[in-house]
Image (cartoon, rainbow, N blue to C red):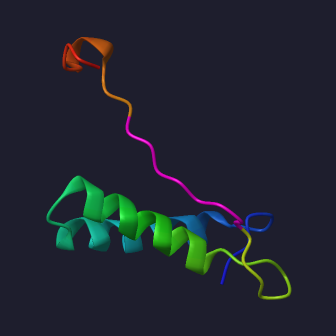
Amino acid sequence: MPTLKTLTEAEAAEMGSDIARLEAGAQTMEQLAHGIVRHLYENLVDDTGARDLALTRFYKTPPYGNLDSDL
C-alpha cells in the first residue's frame, strides 16, 4: 500500500481508478464521498502499516448564489 510520502504517479493513477469504480457504484454524492474518504483512510498507510491519515473529510462547497435564502 502507498504512503503519502512515497506515493508514485502509478500508485496515484491506481487510486484514481479505484475511485472511478466507486463513482460507478454510488447512487448519491454522499455515498461517493463516503467511499472516497473510506478508501483513502484505509489504503494510505505509513512505513509501519499504520494509517497515514488521522482524520479524513470530504467537503462540498456550493456557490453562494445557489444557497437557500435561509442559509
Q: Nearer the viewer, residue 17 or 54?
A: 54
Q: Residue at image x 56%, y 65%?
A: 12
Q: Is residue 20 left or right of residue 4?
A: left
Q: Is residue 70 above or below residue 32?
A: above
Q: Residue furthest right?
A: 48
When asked about the image quadrant of residue 24, the answer is bottom left
Q: Is residue 40 above or below residue 29?
A: below
Q: Residue furthest front?
A: 70
Q: Residue at image x 74%, y 71%?
A: 52
Residue 55 position within the rendered picture, expressed as x and y whole percent measured from the top left: 65, 61
Image quarter (top left, top right, bottom left or bottom right) of the N terminus: bottom right
Q: Residue at image x 20%, y 68%?
A: 26
Magenta residues, dominant SS class: loop
Q: Is residue 64 left or right of residue 70?
A: right
Q: Is residue 53 left or right of residue 68?
A: right
Q: Residue at image x 58%, y 72%?
A: 41
Q: Is residue 8 left or right of residue 16?
A: right
Magenta-colored span? 53-60
- As for residue 56 lying within the magenta part, the answer is yes
Q: Is residue 30 above or below residue 8?
A: above
Residue 18 position within the rendered picture, expressed as x and y whole percent measured from the top left: 39, 74
Q: Nearer the viewer, residue 43 or 10?
A: 43
Image quarter (top left, top right, bottom left or bottom right) of the C terminus: top left
Q: Is residue 24 above or below residue 68?
A: below
- As for residue 45 lying within the magenta part, the answer is no
Residue 59 position within the rendered picture, expressed as x and y whole percent measured from the top left: 44, 43
Residue 62 position within the rendered picture, expressed as x and y whole percent measured from the top left: 31, 27
